[in-house]
Image (cartoon, helix red, strand yellow):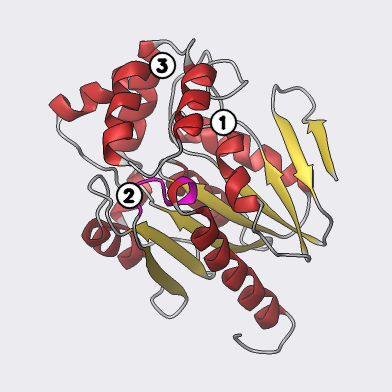
Amino acid sequence: MVASATIPNSDIVLRRSGHGDNAVVFVHGFLDDQYAWNPVLADLSAPAFETIQFDQAGFGDRAEPSGPINFDLFAGDLAAVVDAVDKPFVLVGHSMAAPIVELVASARPARAQGLVLVAPIPMAGAHLPDEFMEVFGSVETYLTTRRQAAPLTPAAELDRIAAAASKRRPEFLRAAADMWNLGHPAGERLSEFAGPVLILSGADDQFITPAVVASAVAARFDSAKSTVIEIDHSSHWPHVERPVAVAEEINRFLARDRAVDDGAGPA
């Protein structure tokens, strides 16, 4: 059963599905919305976890924020979500959401059970050249580039994103893109999150390549508690291009996490 709930004194609407003593919260990336995760959730098998989806500020059905566009803004929203759910949680973040979920998990270590980072932007930033960043200044140019970079994305999904994002101001889009491109100061040091981490990289991702993931993302986490897996035949959006494969890896991660918590050892 799917239920909706609004966090008091905010415009954050949660989409809650399933039951469980734990929660797995899915956080979408740039210009996507909560429904980008639906194909993954269709193959998710995690009976101990309630699943949570929501739109990040300025995306999907949410209005653009009026204040500065920075990681503190987005992390504050996610913190409000996990605090409202009030359960131990695993956070799943795609692309620009990777630094956001890490910041929130690091700030709540007692309840953060794990991180799943899908095609993650490095916490220190992508540092793409200015001429390339122009792509992210409008919905049209971004989606044109995405169609070329991710040929396995269903056309209906791109049409849905275009409709949902049609009213976004170029100023907001560029500010959000500059945020993840420039990065967060925490990226210059090892991660403060000490729990298990699963990193899913698109094998054909030309944006955040597997080499970048290895050097700028995975290297910041405890190697004994982190796993990097390349999803074949996918680019920067493996959860959209190969949702069944992504769901299978998340299922394994959640099952292993529960086995460790229950004292049975790694699965």
Distance of label 3 from label 1 (alpha carbons): 13 Å
For mark 3, give the secondary structure.
helix
At a point 38% along the width and 76% down the height, the residue shown is 223
Are the residues at dot 3 and dot 2 in contact (C-beta closer than 8 Å)? no
In the picture of the structure, the residue carrying the numbered disc 1 is 56
**Number of numbered tags placed on the structure image:** 3
**14 or 179, nearer to the observer:** 14
At a point 53% along the width and 16% down the height, the residue shown is 64
Task: Answer whether residue 103 is visible to the viewer in this image.
Answer: no
Label 3 crowd (10 A; few <14 / some 14-19 / many >=20): some
Mark 2 or mark 1: whose residue is earlier in sequence: 1
Amino acid type, callout 2: Ser
Within the image, what quadrant is residue 130 found in?
top left
Amino acid type, callout 3: Phe
Rendering coords of residue 121 (x, y %):
35, 47
Residue 263, above or below 167 = below
Which numbered tag is attached to residue 190?
none
Residue 49, above or below 8 = below
Query: Left or right: 209 with respect to 147?
Result: left
At a point 71% along the width and 23% down the height, the residue shown is 10
In the picture of the structure, the residue carrying the numbered disc 2 is 235
- Which range is magenta? 234-240
Distance of label 2 from label 1 (alpha carbons): 22 Å
Amino acid type, callout 1: Gln
**241 or 252, nearer to the observer:** 241
Rendering coords of residue 251 (x, y %):
61, 67
In the picture of the structure, the residue carrying the numbered disc 3 is 172
